[in-house]
Image (cartoon, coloured by chain):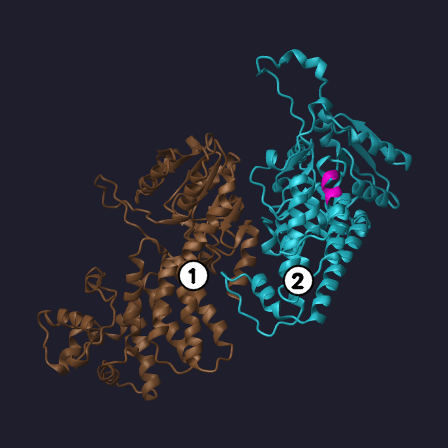
Amino acid sequence: MIAAMPDYQAAVDDFVTRLRRRQVEGSLITAKLTAELLRQVVSHQRLPNVGQAAVLIDVVKSVGLRMIAANPIAIAAANRSALRAPSLHNLLESIPDPVKTPEAPAASVGDSDSKSRSGDRNSVSWKLKHNVIEGITELLQDLDDYHTHVAEQALEHIHQNEVILTLGRSRSLLKFLLEAKKKRSFQVVVAEGAPRYQGHTLAKELAEKGLQTTVITDSAVFAMISRVNMVIIGAHAVMANGGVLAPVGMHMVALAARRHAVPFVVLAGVHKLCPQYPHKPYTLLNDMKSPAEVVEFGELSECFAAGTGDHTTYVVNPTFDYIPPDLVSIFITDTGGHNPSYVYRLIAEYYSPEDYFLQ
Amino acid sequence: MYRPSSLLSNPPNQDFSLRGGSDEDNLDNSLEAERRYFKLRPGFATSDQTMELCNPYHEDRNVSQDERDFNPSSVTFEWLRQAESASLYGGSEDYTRPVLHHVRSWGREVVREKPFSVIHEFDAWRKNPELAEAVAAIKALTAVIKRSGASTMMGLEVELKEASDALKAWDESSISLSAGCDLFMRYVTRTSAIEYEDIEAGKARLIERGEKFGDISQKARRTIAELGKDFIVNGTTVLTHGYSRVVIALLKLAASEGKDFNVVCTEGRPDNTGAEMAKELVPAGIPVTLVLDAGVAYMMETIDMVLVGADGVVESGGIINMLGTYQTALIARSLKKPVYVAAESYKFARLFPLDQRDMSPAPRHVDFLVPLPQTVRVENSARDYTPPQYLTLLFTDLGILTPSAVSDELIQLYL
């Protein structure tokens, strides 16, 4: 195992600490920073003559595991895409292979490919690293363009005089709505999204641009839903079965929308795809934040009898909600609109099966 | 390997062509037992020439052409015989000559034994309780390759096709059997397209692959258990229907990790699958509750998830499994419980049933314990088809799949 080079080790440590302290927030930012960090790691890594791909994959995996340990949710979502050793696997496949072994259910194509590369010469070794870095740069560019590609599709989905409902705030949603505003006139109802109340920020931004906006409380969503033409939200992550991780409160909106047959549109970039299946989504893939955001400690201090250790009150403050795939009508990604049942295809395109479980 | 006893248990209308040998000295010892068995049958001559008349295969020739056309199993072997004679004698209609040819070649070459040995080979492998039917079939086909005298890959393919058809004809209702045969044939076709220097290298490769397949069956169950065990958490109640070794492996693995869950098994008439499952699960420390098949809806509110195996996974992403799986899935859907299926990849079949009757029938005798009036009809299908919209996820050795992903995987398997 090649020892980690000190030049990027400090950067990795710094990033991991920031993740642990939740100083890095938002899937796009996290994805970008991870990709840049990995580019650094790959470019500084010395590769031996033999078994280079395996070494690269090992290094990327070890860095990735550290990051996941720091903040599983942000990483599970955004950085899977950056930790895409499939970019490595795909590049390996593009290098000509003299013997194409027939596809067999038991054989792992990736492993056999990397073993056959063990006899590569120096020029090819430089090429491999170069290709990987190129791949990561392309990925970074995709991340930058993501909002534009999604917003381009806005005119197809939002029509004249429609009422759109949303909850909380999403940057991609903001750009999406502003793009549609250029040609159509419509109104937006924003649920405030307790306890962070980011809906207020979104409403202000929309109002500044001249869109007619209404702010409602989360509890009013069900009352408003029958007056609404479409619900559009931004996802934090999309799981392999088509389920969505979104800010807390979205599941309720999705259920209300299903009840009144209102289309539930989710904006998600390809970098939000996560190859995992949610076996216990409500707790495992959730970040429990401080209860102080919900209720002041002073108000309930009698209920927390620290001396006896008896708790009569629990305050739960989850960050995310899981929306099952049958509640989603369509995913709008930078590659177009897709059905939730199509997500497995997107995952298969961007990930190779060896990457589903990093351990 | 050759078991005369298994012959005795075969129903009369299924015949296996037995070429009665006349050249005693050259017979395999094990085959002698068969020959002697037939020698002892009353009413048949024992002289060399008429020895052939003893065997049921030969009796076929006294059956009228219409009957032969009607009876599927005799048509199969008739076809085989004609195919052989056609290939050997350039389309000769002389039925006696192929028989003599077999007699001549009885000695060391067991080539003509193909249909006979495949079924017996399969039977032998099937006796092993750990092996699934599809795997036993593939092992039998591997044995066919080992004994093959073909000198080209195409010839080998033809022999394998015959053997595969014989196996499928033996049990037309088994989906995993025909899926396993099809998969192996696909693999052979793909491999034979590659130029090998000599037939031996090609055969060696196929044999190696076929032998590895037995391990795949075990490995597949382990992989599926690893993938699925995370879905069982402390306090889960799992409902299962039918007897599936994969499901047992999954539950045992979850229990061995110290998870606290309990299992509800349906009684599973008429096969008593519930009792069989209970016998497997209780030693692993898993609390088991048995309920009548009719009690699934009653129990469903206490259930957290449904976990079943599959006889076959079809192209739509639906499954074919023991009778009662469909209604369990319907109830689970209605009460919003997830339905998980654990199935190995060799159960993926190129079938697309449009309704419940769109599959080859698999009747099973049901004992109602009371005498029934004469005119009462009994609907005794052993299995049903569960459409994909009632399934949540499939755990396979290819990974966890949503039902919509199954057809993609099928294409990759078969292409």
Query: Does residue A231 appear in this view?
Result: no
SS state under label 1:
helix
Q: Nearer the viewer, residue B197 or B27?
A: B197
Give the percent coordinates (x, y) of residue A170. 78, 38
Numbered badge on residue B179:
1
Task: Tell me the CA gap for discs 1 and 2.
Answer: 31 Å
Numbered badge on residue A90:
2
Camera-nearest label, 1 or 2:
2
Q: Residue at x 61, y 41 (%)?
A: A326
Left/right of residue A140 with respect to residue A63 in the rendered view: right
Q: Quadrant of residue B198?
A: bottom left
Q: Which chain is brown?
A: B
Whether residue A15 appears in magenta in the rendering, the answer is yes
Left/right of residue B314 with respect to residue B125 in the rendered view: right
Query: Does residue B309 appear in this view?
Result: yes
Give the percent coordinates (x, y) of residue A17. 73, 39
Left/right of residue B166 with respect to residue A20 in the rendered view: left
Q: Residue at x 77, y 57 (%)?
A: A138
**Mark 1: few, some, or many residues within 10 Å (few <14, many ≥20)?**
many
- Identified by mark 1, the residue type is Ala
Numbered badge on residue A22:
none
Q: Quadrant of residue B116?
A: bottom left
Q: Which chain is cyan?
A: A
Give the percent coordinates (x, y) of residue B325. 42, 44
**Magenta highlight range:** A13-18
Q: Quadrant of residue A215?
A: top right
- Identified by mark 2, the residue type is Asn
